[in-house]
Image (cartoon, rainbow, N blue to C red):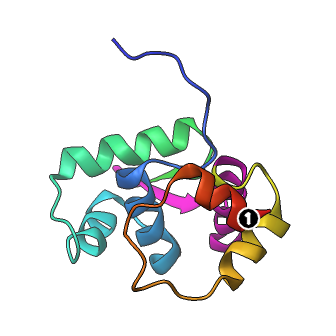
Amino acid sequence: MRRPGPTRDVPPPLEMLCLKALWSLGEGNVSEVRGAVAESKPLAYTTVMTVLERLAKKNVVSRRKVGRAFVYTPRIARDAMRRLALKEFVDCYFEGSEEKLARFLQLPNRESAPEVETERDMEAALL
């Protein structure tokens, strides 16, 4: 049984993979999306069909019947999804502050520093 949690605007990895395929294709049926996805991750036809149906229920893609198959079209642009993902990232790791993210990105490269820094060290670097 799944635990209720906060709803996310960014789809989970398999949904994102199918959405990326649709952005590349413009639109496509299950077979076309499966073919595009197969380059990076071979998935069963039924898996792709289930994932596209989930995306349709979430209104991330639209679908229309063409013959015996459904054709799926993204309802959200790639850049809009990027903005949602970046907002989620900033909210989670930088308390919603784009300024903290910018300061973090301006820190000098610390390749020689230990891989794990203490939370106190990171907070001090961001302040």
Q: Which span of residues is magenta-colored?
A: 66-92
Q: Does 95 sit left or right of 13 as displayed? A: right
Rendering quarter of residue 113: bottom left
- Point out residue 87 in the picture as x, y percentages from the top left corner: 73, 57
* Residue 79 picture location, percent across and down: 69, 73
Q: Can I make out residue 75 in this image?
A: no
Left or right for 40, reference 7 = left
Q: Is residue 118 left or right of residue 102?
A: left
Q: Secondary structure at mark 1?
A: helix
Rendered view: 31 above or below 53: below
Identify which residue is drawn at 23% across, 45% down: 47
Instruction: Locate the N terminus and report the quarter of the image it occupies.
Output: top left
Q: Note whether 63 is above or below 102 in the view shown.
A: above
Of residues 68 and 51, the one drawn nearer to the viewer in this rendering: 51
Magenta-colored stretch includes residue 33: no
Q: What residue sits right under mark 1 in the picture?
A: 126
Residue 54 makes an appearance in the image: yes
Measuring 71% from the left and 61% from the top, which residue is drawn there? 124
Q: Amino acid at mark 1?
A: Leu
Q: Residue at the spot x=60%, y=40% of the render? A: 8
Q: Give the residue at x 21% y 44%.
A: 46
Depth check: 45 or 1 in front?
1
Q: Residues within 10 Å of mark 1 (few under 14, many from 20)?
A: some
Q: Measured from the top left, where is residue 74 in percent x and y?
A: 58, 61
Q: Residue furthest top?
A: 1
Q: Quadrant of the C terminus?
A: bottom right
